[in-house]
Image (cartoon, helix red, strand yellow):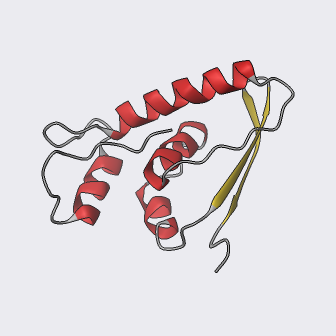
Amino acid sequence: MRERKLSDEWVKDFNEIAQKQWEDFNFKLPNGESLKEVQERNIKTLDHILSESKNQTVVIGTHGTALSTIINDYKPEFRYEAFNAIKHVFPWVVRFEFEGEALRKLGISLGIGK
């Protein structure tokens, strides 16, 4: 699950842009992706993985923003404040438990290996 493309140009203040994107999921820089686009792309991939992996344990590695938009899809209260808090404790592990395509449980472990 690929991370978002922020822009073709250097972003001087990542935190400012990140906050704008979390406030407006459609906001994007020129030639970049919005969080809505990242979320839709990665949820589509996750849905495909779930449909192909019924009754199996699957491990997926991805990037912080990509993963955060997936969490937000299932838990809309996961917003900029939560993203901003976790970005300082990478790496972190999120465990999703599904029954079919329905989320049954979500657990987050912060600061693994620190």
The answer to whether residue 43 is left or right of residue 37 is right
Question: Taking 50 as reference, is 114 above or below it?
Answer: below
Residue 85, image x and y in percent?
Answer: 49, 69
Q: Measuring 19% from the left and 66% from the top, which residue is drawn there? A: 13
Q: Say which quadrant the C terminus sits in.
A: bottom right
Residue 68, image x and y in percent?
Answer: 50, 49
Quarter of the image for residue 93 reads bottom right
The residue furthest bottom is 114
The answer to whether residue 100 is left or right of residue 61 is right
Question: Taking 90 as reference, is 27 above or below it?
Answer: above
The residue furthest right is 55
Residue 5, image x and y in percent?
Answer: 29, 42
Q: Measuring 48% from the left and 43% from the top, which residue is drawn there? A: 69
Q: Nearer the viewer, residue 104 or 93?
A: 93
Q: Nearer the viewer, residue 13 or 73?
A: 13
Q: Measuring 52% from the left and 43% from the top, which residue is drawn there? A: 72
Residue 45, image x and y in percent?
Answer: 55, 27
Q: How many marks?
A: 0
The answer to whether residue 71 is left or right of residue 18 is right
